Amino acid sequence: MKCPYCSSIDIVYDFERGYAVCGKCGTIIDTIFIEQFIGIACESTKYAVKSVKNAIKFKKTHSYTQRLYEYLKEVNKYEIFMRRCRKNVNVNIDAIKIVLSGGKARIYKHVGDDELMRIVKNDYVIRKIMEMLDEDAILSSRTFRSKVAIALLIKNLLIYGEADLNEIAQKTNVSRVHIQRLTKILKTRIKELRPRLTEIKKLLNSMIPIPS
C-alpha cells in the first residue's frame, strides 16, 4: 500500500483508532479492522495486543451502530408511508422494501381487502372482469377496491341492466360518491371494453354452470 497523495510507502497502522495513516504526510488512507492486522509487524507486542482488543471492540460497536442505523431508516420510511395512510388502511413494510428496491408491490392494504379477495377468488365472472380491467390503460390504475367495485357494477349491469350503488359501496368499503365517479369513468371506456364485455355477457348467458 502507498499513499495516493504523496506516494510514500511509509504507512502507519493505527489499530486503536482503526485507521491506516501515511507516515510522511499524515493522510488517513483507509479504515482498518482486525482482519487486516494479520501478517503486519508491530514494534510493541503489548501495544499491538491492546490495539487489537480495541479494534475488535470498535468493530463490534461499529457493526451494531450500522444495524441500528439501518433499522432507523426502515422505521423512518414506514412512518412516511404511514402518514399518507387513510382510515382503515395498513402499510406493508415488506412491500415498502420491494418498491424501494425497484420492484412492484402493494404498499397500502385496506382492512376490508381480505374479504374482497375472497369475493374475487370465489366468483369466476368477477375474476374475468378484473382481468379485463387490468388490461385497460385507464381502469388498470384504479385501486384494488375500486376495481372490485367496477367489476361488481359491470356484472350487475350485464345481468340485471342496473346496479345498486349503495350495496356495492357497502360491500367494497368505497364511498357512494366515489362509486358514482367510477361509473362515469366506466362510461368513457365502454367503447374500448365492448368486445370483452360481449364475451363476458355470453359467458353469463351460457348454460355451463359458472363456479362460485
Image: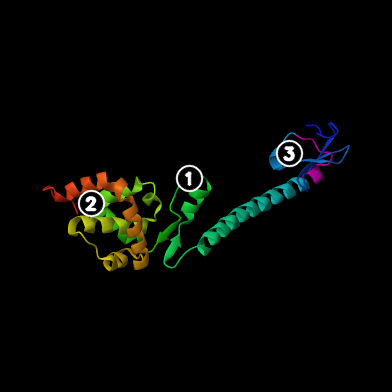
Q: Nearer the viewer, mark 1 or mark 3?
A: 1
- Residue at the spot 38% in from the left edge and 50% down from the top edge: 140
Q: Percent position (x, y) of residue 201? A: 19, 49
Q: Nearer the viewer, mark 3 or mark 2?
A: 2
> Of the numbered discs in the image, which one, if any, rests on residue 103?
1
Neighbour tally class for label 3: few under 14, some 14-19, many 20 plus, Cα within 10 Å: some
- In the displayed structure, would residue 82 be above or below residue 140? below
Which quarter of the figure has residue 21? top right
Task: Say if the magenta span includes residue 187.
Answer: no
> Of the numbered discs in the image, which one, if any, rests on residue 31?
none
- Residue at the spot 13% in from the left edge and 47% down from the top edge: 206
Residue 12 can be seen in this image: yes
Specify the amino acid type for callout 2: Val
> Of the numbered discs in the image, which one, if any, rests on residue 125?
2
- Residue at the spot 31% in from the left edge and 61% down from the top edge: 115
Q: Which residues are magenta?
A: 40-49
